[in-house]
Amino acid sequence: MTEFNSVYTVHIQMFVISQTDKRPMYLQIMEQIKQRIAVGDWAAGQAIPSIRQLAADIGVSVITVKRAYLELEREGVIVTRQGKGCFVASDSDLGTRIREQELARHLDQAVRSAAMMGLSQKNLEKRIRALYDRVTDEEKEPV
Amino acid sequence: MTDYAIELNGVCKSYRFFELQNIALQLQRGTIMGLIGPNGAGKSTTIRILMGLVHQDRGEVRVLGHRMPQEQIAAKWDIGFASEDMRLYDSMTLGWHISFMKSMYQSWDDLYAQLLLKRFKLRAEQKIKGLSHGQRVKATLLLVLARRPNLLVLDEPTTGLDPVARHEILRELTAVMVEDGRSILFSSHNTQDVEQISDQITFIDRGRIIDSMDKEVYLDRWRRLRLEAPDGVALRALPGVIEIQQTGRLAVAIANAFEPHLPNAYESSGARVRAVENMTLEEIFVANVERSREEVNA
């Protein structure tokens, strides 16, 4: 009985699988785990839910969570210890590394779309600079 | 003990206007399989055969190691089966049904039943005839789940439910899987439900199995490529591509055996790859059924 209760008390409501998000579910789960680590909600070395547990909490198939965990393990974000369960990798820079990866991905996408539009390097730089100024200005302004 | 909760081999069944042809499928223990297909594809017939309710003309059926239909009595103690046409007693209360099931099945888990009553917002004192469709479905599921069977066989468990009720049921089904070794086979028209909770997907159309495999592998094999052809060139369907449509210079190719080198192959034939997109099960469903129908008509 306790097992069944735990399913509902350990509710991980914050995982949201979106139907309008075009990425496969396992990628969405991977990203949300990474976000959790990046913001420090899941600390380095901390135990994380088992595959079956997380699948039940989110309400998705075991195989999907299994795939997300496998990929995260391959990326060095989490580790599985035989018989002990799954843990966030005990790497203190993990949060920074994940944010760094995220930034690299966004920049890559931006540069690709710029190239596809035939935008010059100079032009792209100019737009990034303007954008940077606007965003930092917004942060200075009191809300 | 076999590794399979359900095993069908070479199963055939002929009716006057419908034929189930050479059905082979395997449900591994500890997994959920979603059975999808259009109306009249043979989903319910397949389910009735594996429950021993309809006898196959030919072929072998094993459920939890028991041969069906011969050993269905032994098998059914450990199978929870629910379908649309299953009736509860209208003039009796849900509580009466609960006591009845409790007296029948030693495996009955009263605490779990109480928990499900609360989660499904049902009341034991309520008579069945006063329940809405959604409440009836939930009541039936409660009666099946609280027996804690090793295998659940559910024919269209989410049909006709509102989004909230559908969600509650999907959640309950995935919660069952926390325990090792429990298996679920369910049929649905709702590709979203199947995509969300199943480990295995089996596609049926016109009495035949078109595909049956691991969901992640299956979704990964399908891609939509948005291509731009050089002027005046009609792009071909390269290996792995089942369909290509082109209007002017823009083309859309659907691959059902996608390999990472496929975009490169198009690039080297002079096309530009504008996007490589994943497909939802719904999109795959439609593409697959259309293709299988073209094959039949050809």
Image (tube, helix red, strand yellow):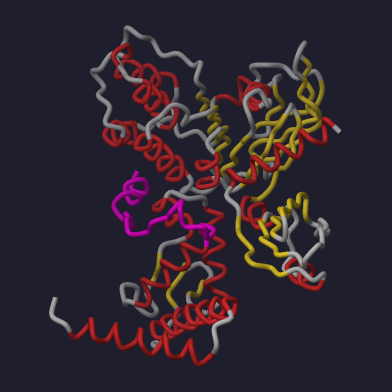
Q: Is residue A79 above or below residue B104?
A: below
Image position, residue B138 (x, y; %): 38, 28
The C terminus of chain B is located in which quarter? Answer: top right
The N terminus of chain B is located in which quarter? Answer: top right
Residue B3 visible, this angle: yes
Secondary structure mostly seen in the magenta stretch: loop
Q: Is residue A30 magenta?
A: no
Residue farthest along the bottom direction in this orientation = A122
Q: In this view, does A33 lie above or below B201?
A: below
In the image, taking residue B146 as reference, residue A124 lies left or right, namely right
Q: Residue at x 43, y 55 (%)?
A: A17
Residue B78 visible, this angle: no
* Stretch of the chain drawn in magenta: A1-26
B149 or B45, which is in the foreground? B45
Rendered image quadrant of residue B26:
top right
Residue farthest along the top direction in this orientation = B91
B61 or B225, which is in the foreground? B225
Image position, residue B54 (x, y; %): 68, 16
Q: In this view, does B264 lie above or below A59?
A: below
Q: Which residue is drawn at 68% across and 22% down?
A: B49
Labels in figure, total: 0
Residue farthest along the right direction in this orientation = B298
